Structure formats: C-alpha cells, structure tokens
Amino acid sequence: MSSLLSTPLFGVVLTFLVYRCSEMLYRRTRFILFNPVALSIVTIIFLLKSLQIPYQEYSRGGDMILFLLGPAVVALALPLYQRRQELFKRKRPILFGILAGAVTSIVTAAGTAWLLGGSRDVVLSMVPKSATTPIAIGIVEQIGGIVPLTAALVVLTGCLGAICGPEFCRMIGIRSKVAMGLAVGTAAHGIGTARVLEEDRFAGAVAGLAIGLNGLATSFIAPFLTLMFF
Amino acid sequence: MLQGLVFLLVFQFLGEVLSDFLGLPLPGNVLGMALLLLALTLGVVKEESLREAADLLLSYMALFFVPAGVGVMLYFDLISQQWMPIVVGTVFSTFAVIAVTGWTEKWLDQAESDDE
C-alpha cells in the first residue's frame, strides 16, 4: 500500500476520480456550492487528512496534472484570436475595466484586512490576491508579505470567484459576455476563467485576457500603493 | 492533435524564455499566450492545427487547478491564526473587484456605442 502511494499514479487517479464524481454531482444538482473545482479540493484535502497521507505523496501525481495548466493557458490564445475584431473594437472598456479592477483589488483586500486588525505581514500578503499565482508570488516577494499565505489566498479567491462569479454578475446587472468574462477573470484569475469557460467560450477567452493584463497592472500598481500606505 | 500540443508547449517554452530573459513580471504561460496570439495574427501558426488540442485542454482547464488548491492544506495553521481579516478581506474584495470591473466595462461600452 505504501509503495503504491509513492507512485505518481496515486495523485493522478485520485484527482481524476474525485473530479469526475464532483462534476457529476454538480451536473445533477446544479447547486453552486458543489462547484467541481472547489468540491474536489475540499474532498481531496479531507481524504488525505483523514487517511493521514502526507501532501508530498499526493503532489507527485498532482504536479503532473498541474503541469497541463501551462499549455491550457497558452491555448486561450485561440478563442482570443477567433474573436479578435470584437475585442479590438472594445479595447478601451476592456483596458479601463481591468485597471479599475486591479486598483479595487489591492485597496479593498489590504484595506479590509487592515481595518479588521490584520498584522502588517498579513495585510501585505493580501495585496496581490487577485493576480495569477506566479505573478502574485513575485509581487509579495517584492513588497514583503508571507509567500505561502499569498499562494493560499490566490486559490481561495479563485474558488470564490468560480463559485459565485457568474451568478453575482447576473445579480448586479452585468450581462454581456465581455463584461462578465472580464470581471470574473480580473477578480479570480485562472480558476474563475475555467468556470467562465464552461459557461461560454468567448467569455472564457476574455477572462483569459484579463488574467494577463490584470497580472501586469497589479505588478506595476501594487508596489506604489503599498509604499504610499505602509 | 499532437501537432497542436507541440505548438502549445513550444509557445509556453518561448514564453518562459522571454520572461526569464527580459525579467518581466509576467509568467511564461501568459507570455506564451500573447506570443501565440501574435503568431496566429501574423499567420505563422494556422488556427486549424491548434483547434483539437486547444479545445481539449480548455475544456479540462478547471481540473488542472485542483492540485494547486489541495496545496492550501499545508497552510491551514497560517490562515487560522488571523482568519477573520483574511477571510472577510478576501470575500469582500473579490465581490468588489467583480462589480467594479464589470460595471466599468459596461458603462464605457455603453458610452462608446452612444457616441456612434
């Protein structure tokens, strides 16, 4: 049994199985809290903790699945290319939307944590939470927060955006595919994008664009804003 | 299928190289996406050669995030020490960003179409 756990197969099979079941449950119930990504994460963490399997055993296979995320992000170029004319026509709303989102993210995340008595380390770690993981880690190393905490916050933000993003958009009157993709992609990076992609391919591509541009905007704005306030 | 996958991986690699070389704050896969978009626009890469591989990977993108999320289990202690400011800040900020970004795009879009 223990030798089986140490092959990558364990993490790969566990991830596939749990994801497949979560997806089926979500399709049957359409209950938003059963978002397949969030449910899979919670289920796998619960299984590993209760069976006392160390994370390192899981990540041998988990890392192989994670590797595929790279080419998947590159693949977002295709839907962007297919709708390039429509996007180019709306370049100003798109760029200013992302810029407004990037500033909002930094100010509200750090500001709320500070108001509620978070320590300086924690407040700084909150700053890049809406940026995609590699960018967020780069930023937090620069401004001085807790790197693992930021990595965890990025995932939490992504799951939250994936669970509620599209529904919240409809609730507050954001109905166009471009606006919805942009909003969820800016707020919840890749995990949000994956959810939007399931709703609509074009909206997903816009969300993918937002990952890159919001990451860029956040990495330029965050150091200035944190210098001003801290 | 294989050809498309090779293209995607090559562009990711080019993105990593560029990110490293120029010291840009953007990760390699995001730069790879930009480079591939450029290559498609210039006609260096044909849309058809990518379609199958891109469609497959995009339809499973959510699954690829699961292992990253499981990594959060390593930091439960860190989060629980100051869970209030962390959780409330994250939740409030996520909704605020969605609203501000979406509304800004919507308003500017409407303003521009009114001008036409």
Image: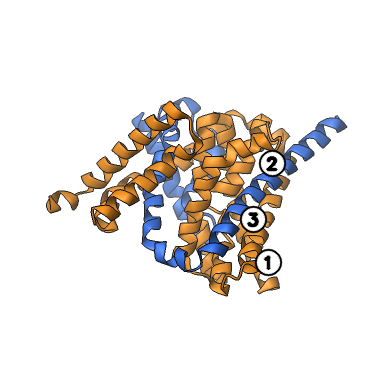
Q: Relative to A55, is B82 above or below?
A: below
Q: Is residue A193 visible?
A: yes
In terms of secondary structure, where does tag 3 sit? Answer: helix
In this picture, residue B98 sits left or right of residue B62? right
In this picture, residue A104 sits left or right of residue A193? right
Figure disc tally: 3
Residue A25 in the image, given as x and y percentages of width and height:
39, 31
Could you tell me the amino acid type at mark 2?
A: Gly
In terms of secondary structure, where does tag 1 sit? Answer: helix
Q: Which mark is residue B102?
A: 2
Q: Residue furthest right?
A: B115
Q: Which residue is mark 1?
A: A225
Colour representing chain A:
orange
Q: Which residue is mark 3?
A: A105
Tell me the residue at 71%/35% (across/down).
Answer: A173
Q: Which comes before the other along the chain, label 1 or label 3?
A: 3
Residue B16 in the image, given as x and y percentages of width and height:
45, 53
Split into 4 quadrants, where in the image is the C terminus of chain A?
bottom right
Residue contact at pointers 1 and 3, CB within 8 angstroms: no
Report the front residue among A199 and B40: A199
Could you tell me the amino acid type at mark 3?
A: Ser
Q: Which mark is residue A131?
A: none
Q: Nearer the viewer, mark 1 or mark 2?
A: 2
Q: Give the chain letter at badge 3.
A: A
Give the chain letter for blue: B
